[in-house]
Image (tube, rainbow, N blue to C red):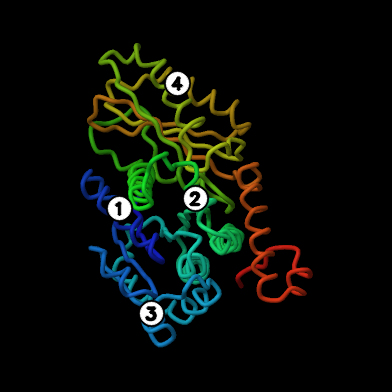
């Protein structure tokens, strides 16, 4: 699947660079262009991909200080300029645009949904948002920002693929090491998803193509991605259990949005050497996914690649009704109410929900 990436905000820029580097290092050629957009000049200076500073007349290159309404305003004012910069990267090869952002900060949480709306208005290919939720320990402002951004992105994008920081943190990680490890994990999972359908080594029996990814992510709402891998045998018959095992691990222990299993649609991609992929194993794993997710729309296929391992890439679409999402939105709503109380006690009492950004 050929994509163009736009990273918005600090986290969005770093993840976009990690995705572009992973795609280049693996030789997939799925990423056809990458651009990082931010209101803070220092954050852009750390990146090796193309960058664009916006809102300089408003914030002088210093960022929006967590104010996602200001982030949305600046992106609305700068959208034409950003899309002009994007035109040279969007060729006829591109099958989707992916807006990447951390949903807790001001530029990412405000700018990503606004840019998504403008991209939807201009382009006739899918526009997805890859959004990272802040951890519980990142403060109430970030929770409130992310709640409003999730609500808006889920409406504006063809799909919002969520990454839950809390689900991927490891004990003992420093803040910087934790974010770097999470970014690498995102790049691996999402990078493999983009590369699906771009056959690299050999020809599989039932290769996944871009239309199956698009159909899994269609209809808006929230999606998640999981991944697990294990060593394989040269005899495909001995890999039946390996394929079902890595699929179970991907779905139950390694999703980008943990514990969000009930889904409207699903996609199972088994990556590995084509001569080691068992069709029986793929079909058995796909049927197990149907039972586990409650979805009757689970697609399955191969991703041929020269590797001694077999990997399972699981994509779930339509998980917005899961307890995990509802739990986060409740937390974000409480944070929004507390924020309003600090500004004006009466407003805090009157505001019993999350407002749209737009």
Alpha-carbon neighbours of circle 2 within 10 Å: few (<14), some, or many (≥20)? many
Could you say where residue 138 lies in the image, as x and y percent from the top left?
50, 56
Mark positioned earlier in the residue sequence (3 or 1): 1
The crowding category of the residue bearing disc 1, from other C-alpha atoms within 10 Å (few below 14, some 14 to 19, many at least 20), is: many
> What's the CA distance linking mark 1 and mark 2?
17 Å
Mark positioned earlier in the residue sequence (3 or 2): 3
In the structure shown, which secondary structural element does the residue marked by tag 4 occupy? helix
Residue at the image point whose x is 45% and y is 44% from the top: 213
Residue 161 is tagged as 2
Q: Is residue 131 above or below residue 306?
A: below
Disc 1 versus disc 2: nearer the observer:
1
The residue at the point 52 percent across, 52 percent down is 137
* Spot occupied by residue 100 in the image (x, y as percentages of width and height): 42, 59
- Quarter assignment of residue 349: bottom right
Image-based side of 277 in relation to 106, left or right? left
Which residue is label 1 attached to? 18
Left or right, 343 with reference to 256: right
Q: The C terminus appears in which quarter of the rendering?
A: bottom right
Q: Are marks 2 and 4 in contact (CB under 8 Å)?
A: no
**Dot 2: element:** strand
Q: Which residue is mark 3?
A: 81
Report helix, strand or loop for mark 1: helix
Camera-side mark, 3 or 1: 1
Q: Is residue 155 left or right of residue 211?
A: right
């Amino acid at each position: 699947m050929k994509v163009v990436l736009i990273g918005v905000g600090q986290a969005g820029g770093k993840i976009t660079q990690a995705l572009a580097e992973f795609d280049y290092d693996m030789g997939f050629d799925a990423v056809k262009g990458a651009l990082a957009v931010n209101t803070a000049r220092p954050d852009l200076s750390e990146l090796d991909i193309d960058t664009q500073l916006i809102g300089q007349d408003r914030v002088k290159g210093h960022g929006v200080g967590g104010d996602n309404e200001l982030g949305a305003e600046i992106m609305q004012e700068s959208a034409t300029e950003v899309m002009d910069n994007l035109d040279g990267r969007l060729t006829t090869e591109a099958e989707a645009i992916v807006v990447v952002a951390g949903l807790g900060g001001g530029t990412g949480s405000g700018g990503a949904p606004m840019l998504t709306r403008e991209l939807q208005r201009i382009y006739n290919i899918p526009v997805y948002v890859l959004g990272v939720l802040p951890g519980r320990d990142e403060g109430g402002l970030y929770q409130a920002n992310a709640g409003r951004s999730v609500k808006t992105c889920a409406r504006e994008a063809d799909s919002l693929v969520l990454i839950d920081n809390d689900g991927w943190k490891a004990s003992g990680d420093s803040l910087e090491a934790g974010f770097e490890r999470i970014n690498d994990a995102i790049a691996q999972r999402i990078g493999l998803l983009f590369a699906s359908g771009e056959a690299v080594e050999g020809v599989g029996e039932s290769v996944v193509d871009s239309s199956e990814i698009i159909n899994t992510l269609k209809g808006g709402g929230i999606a998640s991605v999981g991944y697990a891998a294990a060593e394989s045998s040269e005899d495909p018959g001995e890999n039946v259990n390996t394929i079902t095992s890595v699929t179970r691990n991907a779905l139950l222990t390694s999703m980008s949005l943990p514990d969000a299993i009930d889904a409207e649609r699903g996609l199972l991609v088994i990556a590995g050497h084509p001569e080691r992929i068992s069709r029986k194993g793929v079909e058995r794993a796909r049927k197990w996914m149907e039972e586990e997710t409650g979805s009757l729309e689970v697609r399955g296929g191969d991703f041929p690649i020269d590797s001694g391992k077999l990997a399972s890439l699981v994509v779930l679409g339509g998980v917005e009704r899961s307890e995990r999402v509802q739990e986060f939105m409740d937390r974000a709503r409480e944070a929004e109410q507390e924020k309003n109380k600090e500004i004006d006690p009466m407003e805090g009492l009157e505001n019993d929900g999350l407002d749209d950004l737009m």
